[in-house]
Image: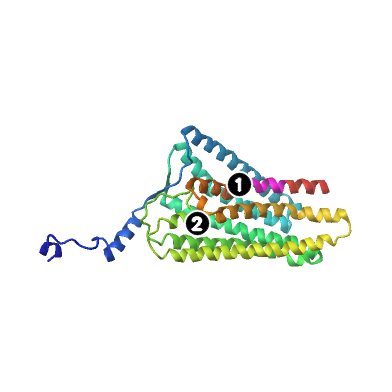
Amino acid sequence: MRLREVCPNLSLPFPPWTGLHGQRQQMANSSSITHFLLLPFPGTRQLQLLHFCLFLAIYLAALLGNGLIITTIAWDHHLHTPMYFFLLNLALTDLGCISTTVPKSMANSLRDTRDISYAGCAAQVFLFPFFISAEIYLLTTMSYDRYVAICRPLHYETLLGSRVCVHIAAAAWTCGFLYALLHTANTFSLPLCQGNAVDQFFCEIPQILKLSCSTSYFRELWLLVLGLSLAFGCFMFLVVSYVQIFRAVLRIPSQQGRHKAFFTCLPHLAVVSVCISTGFIANLKPSSISSPYLDLVVSVLYSVVPPAVNPLIYSLRNQELKADE
């Protein structure tokens, strides 16, 4: 016999959906989500079309620039060196990174909608960290390539042979894959009961965590801490490598030799600076000035700008090489 039937005037001190039933309801809410709502770019219909055109121009520039780098390095046998092999892999990560987020945002602006399917959101949650982490590892490897080329030139072929380069690149892609897979599996294993509106123009892990109603999200926070620790380790490796490089460059007797050695590192330093500066702006901005649309602008800065700018930076390096020839 139910308690309500015995005491019809009794007010229960707790809602009837708490406890085990509440957990089942949360899981039901999570499993019933079939799509998510992305944060739209603000403004009128004309501004949305302007956003579409702007993103289309940036995306085409990234496709053209990175595509030219990939095809040029692949077909020109004179560029089959460790530096350009890693540059080819970097161009692939840039293409993957911008292709993960920008096309869907353009389609939503063109169709005046916010929808993204559950599978599409999960794909973005996996692919974006995959390409970003692989790019960080490749940039770190490229600093080692410059260190060996300048500080230990006689051992360059031994330390960075073709087989070694393939193994290093494979390790970077594999680490990125495992890191992204771990994030994705853990993120979507959490029950989501805070709706399906994502405060970002693509499905970003921190924004998905805000929809969780489980205290187990601390597992994901630990993964984020691990990722930041790995990124900091890569940053320190970059710093140590370039300290050694600059010390070696300053010991070169001729000014022309110092100039040439410095310019072999300049494009890599520029790309690293773009990635680090945009990442710092995104992660270290004060929470007091945070707002959905400010976060939107910052996310565009670190997810869209580097893949479009990197080919331009390295094209300057190609002009320098042609000048040297």
Mark 1, Cα crowd under 10 Å, few <14 / some 14-19 / many 20+, is some
Please give left or right for residue 154 compared with residue 15 in the image.
right
Q: Quadrant of residue 172?
A: bottom right
Identity of the residue drawn at 68% across and 45% down: 312
Is residue 148 something that shows in the picture? no
Residue range in magenta is 308-315
Identity of the residue drawn at 78% across and 47% down: 320
Residue on which the image places disc 1: 305
Relative to residue 42, is residue 284 depicted above or below?
Answer: below
Indicate the amino acid at tag 2: Phe
Is residue 287 something that shows in the picture? yes
Residue 125 percent coordinates (x, y) = 48, 55
In what quadrant of the picture does the N terminus appear?
A: bottom left
**How many callouts does the rendering have?**
2
Q: Front-most of 298 and 184?
A: 298
Residue 176 percent coordinates (x, y) = 56, 61
Residue on which the image places disc 2: 126
